[in-house]
Image (cartoon, grey):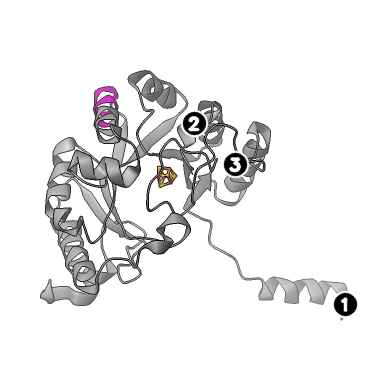
Amino acid sequence: MPPRSRSRLANSMTVKAEAPYLIALNLTERCNLACEHCYLDAKVMKEGAADELDTDELKGVIDEIASVGPEAMIVLTGGEPLLRRDIEELAAHASGLGLMVVIGSNGILLTPERVERLKRAGVAGVGLSVDSLDPDHHDSFRGRRGAWLKTMASIDACKAAGLAFQIHFSVTDDTAHEIDDMIAFARDAGAMVLNVFFMVCTGRAEKYTDISPEKYEAVLRRVAHAARDEERLMVRAKCAPPFQADRNGDRSGLANHLGPRL
Ligand code: SF4
């Protein structure tokens, strides 16, 4: 086959992949908490994992991400990403390339000064974990006394600085009954989004058998109602295959599927 025909055939067979619109980059396995449900089994607190990428290597990864998804949202997470001293440098690099930068944090280290530095680095928002409105339960789930109070202080710091934030609620059998209160809390706190996470049973979460089917469905229905009814707060289910949020994040597959039954 002549080269010209070959290249025409190759072009006609090329499948164009869509540009990614959301990419999570796990910057570290280190963490200052010891959550029971950590799917990464994060633990290497001080020394760092031997294979953790350095600043330049991560900038190279971010460059590649920007080249395939120039308008993507990039979530810098971990482990606990705020344990990295170069987090602001990495965020500034990504935002300088035009990416929308979000930090996924447990909220322990987000002081007002840190919030200001992240804003200056072009960070558009942060995701903070609140696993229960009962401080004792949250602390015991997260493996550190006082974690809940520090996360509440982080929320206050974001509000004071005008940095958008979303709340991540990992729902279990023990906390499924909190879903209504958690939606009200996120709304009243001024969160932009409430993400309700279901367990990914790997790492330390391997021992979880996940939430019971009845509670799973009840929580999903409540989330679907809230996704439809909340005016300012976006409510979404994550790691829940039956609940397929559409790409705008404002409708749910469950809501569409169940329709009038909801
Ligand atoms: S805060 Fe996140 S990374 Fe750290 S132990 Fe908990 S789940 Fe794992």
Upstream in the sequence, badge 2 or badge 3?
A: 3
* Quarter that holds the N terminus: bottom right
- Let me know if residue 187 is in the magenta part: no
Q: Position of residue 230 (x, y in %)?
A: 15, 52
Q: Label 3 sits on what residue type?
A: Ile
Check disc 3 and report the residue beneath it: 62
Upstream in the sequence, badge 2 or badge 1?
A: 1
Residue at the location (18% across, 45% down)? 232
Beta carbon at label 3 within 8 Å of ligand 1:
no
Badge number at residue 2: 1
Magenta span: 155-162
- Element marked by disc 3: helix
Quadrant in the picture for residue 215: bottom left
- Mark 2 Cα-neighbour bin, 10 Å: few <14, some 14–19, many ≥20: many
User: Comparing marks 1 and 3, which lies closer to the viewer?
Assistant: 3
| Left or right of residue 260, residue 19 in this image | right
Q: Position of residue 30 (x, y in %)?
A: 52, 39
Check disc 2 and report the residue beneath it: 83
Q: Is residue 152 above or below residue 172?
A: above
Cα distance in 3D space between marks 2 and 3:
19 Å
Badge number at residue 120: none
